[in-house]
Amino acid sequence: MRNWSGYRTAKRDLIRSLSGTVLEIGAGSGANFADLPADVDWIGLEPNRRARAQLARTAPRRQVLDAGAEQIPLPSASIDGVLSTVVLCSVADLPAALAELHRVLRPGGRFVFVEHVAAPRGSTTYRLQKLAAPITRRFDRGCNPARDIQTAIDLSGFSTLQLEHFTMPGLIPIPFIAGAATR
Ligand SMILES: C[S@@+](CC[C@H](N)C(=O)[O-])C[C@H]1O[C@@H](n2cnc3c(N)ncnc32)[C@H](O)[C@@H]1O
């Protein structure tokens, strides 16, 4: 488990490790642009209309797909890297989304993820995450804080190369994973 102070650097280094054609799912307002290498050929995927409008302003010449990660309108093995930061908590069907990420990545392609995840079962944080889930799912864009995203990634056919754990300090400490996997 790494100290939270290392989180920002770990996230930046992971994003900087991407190259070629990169698909960023749930791109939001484009918060990761600053860390992406300048020569990356970026494609965004964002189902939220407002976020897409924001992306059109911040990145007018970039392609943004109006779709969810569960059904990606791109050919198989057409992408060198996939980026997901704080998105997998919100997708409606996590296994379907991961299967799609696996499909669009070329063999050897890199899947970079930075996600908040469920605390260990039985912990106070996990109980609080379970209690909060119905509220956050309804009012925080479908976010399920009690989702075991790491196990889902482990089961989705990727080889995990790198994985670090962080805890965001606070009244309720929130566990995060940051890592990279290959197809
Ligand atoms: C918490 S925001 C994170 C935005 C951005 N990745 C960041 O790190 O700032 C979650 C994003 O996931 C998007 N999202 C929700 N459901 C999704 C889905 N099924 N497929 C792809 N993106 C989705 C939301 O519209 C939102 O932009």
Image (cartoon, grey):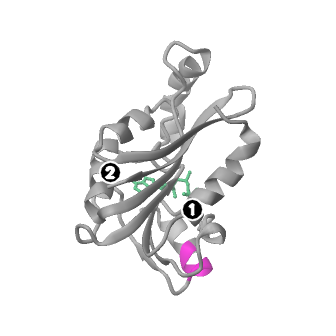
For image coordinates 50% across by 70% down, the residue present is 52
Whether residue 49 is situated above or below residue 137 in the rendered picture? below
Q: Is residue 118 left or right of residue 93?
A: right
Q: Which residue is mark 1?
A: 15
Magenta residues span 55-59
Tag 2: amino acid: Ala
Q: CA distance from mark 2 to mark 1?
A: 20 Å
Q: N-terminal of the two: label 2 or label 1?
A: 1
Q: Residue most toward the top?
A: 122
Q: Percent x, y for residue 93?
A: 32, 44
The reply to whether the magenta stretch includes residue 57 is yes
The mark found on residue 3 in the picture is none
Name the residue that disc number 2 marks: 97
| Image position of 76 with respect to 95: above or below | below
Residue at the image point whose x is 73% and y is 36% from the top: 3
Q: Position of residue 182 (x, y in %)?
A: 37, 54
Secondary structure of residue under mark 2: helix
Does the numbered disc 2 mark a residue whose Cβ is under 8 Å from ligand 1?
A: yes
The amino acid on which the numbered mark 1 sits, given as a three-letter code, is Ile
Q: Position of residue 110 (x, y in %)?
A: 41, 60
Q: Residues within 10 Å of mark 1 (few under 14, many from 20)?
A: many
Q: Give the residue displayed 25% in from the left and 59% down from the top.
A: 103
77 sits left or right of 80 in the view: left
